Amino acid sequence: MEHVTAHPHAVPDPVLGVFLVAESLTEAEAMTTVLCRRLLNSHTGLSGWGLRRAQVPLLAPLGHGPLGPPESSSPPSDLRRE
């Protein structure tokens, strides 16, 4: 596990973001499920809470899509193919 972040006010349910190293999406989801169930079973402060699902959101590679810059930071080139 690399990092955990909580989003307690997410709608419709709170979200726990777990960042970890895994060989596949399936492995990441399985590891997160085990981790969350262990936490839920061992910490009394979490009694009454349950795991609804553990799933990996698909994100665009860095620099592409909504996570990337809206436009290139490089000045436009005057080179053109003819």
Image (spheres, rainbow, N blue to C red):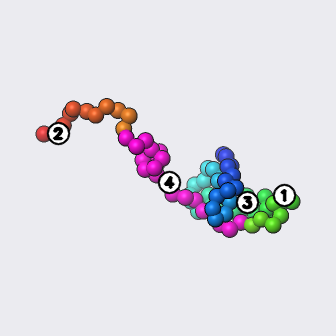
Whether tag 1 and tag 2 are in contact, CB under 8 A, the answer is no
Q: Is residue 70 magenta?
A: yes
Q: Nearer the viewer, residue 56 or 5?
A: 5
* Residue 74, horizontal then vertical, whole percent: 35, 32
Q: Does any portion of residue 1 appear in the rendered image? A: no
The residues tagged by marks 1 and 4 sit, at their Cα atoms, a distance apart of 32 Å
How packed mark 1 is, by other alpha carbons closer than 10 Å (few <14, some 14-19, many 20 or more), is few
* Residue 62, horizontal then vertical, whole percent: 47, 45
The residue stretch that appears in magenta: 51-71
Instruction: Inspect the image, locate mark 4, and give the three-letter code of the amino acid beneath it.
Output: Leu
Q: Which residue is at the far right?
A: 44
Q: Residue drawn at (13%, 39%), measured in percent from left and top?
A: 82
Please tell me which of labels 1 and 4 falls first in the chain. 1
Please tell me which of labels 1 and 3 falls first in the chain. 3
The residues tagged by marks 3 and 2 sit, at their Cα atoms, a distance apart of 54 Å
Please tell me which of labels 3 and 2 falls first in the chain. 3
Horizontally, residue 36 falls left or right of residue 67, namely: right
Horizontally, residue 69 falls left or right of residue 21, namely: left
What residue would you read off at disc 4?
Answer: 59
* Residue 47, horizontal then vertical, whole percent: 83, 64
Instruction: Inspect the image, locate mark 2, and give the three-letter code of the amino acid beneath it.
Output: Arg
Tell me which corner region of the image, top left, top right, bottom left or bottom right, holds residue 55.
bottom right
Please tell me which of labels 4 and 2 falls first in the chain. 4
* Residue 30, horizontal then vertical, whole percent: 65, 62
Label 1 vs label 2, nearer the camera: 1
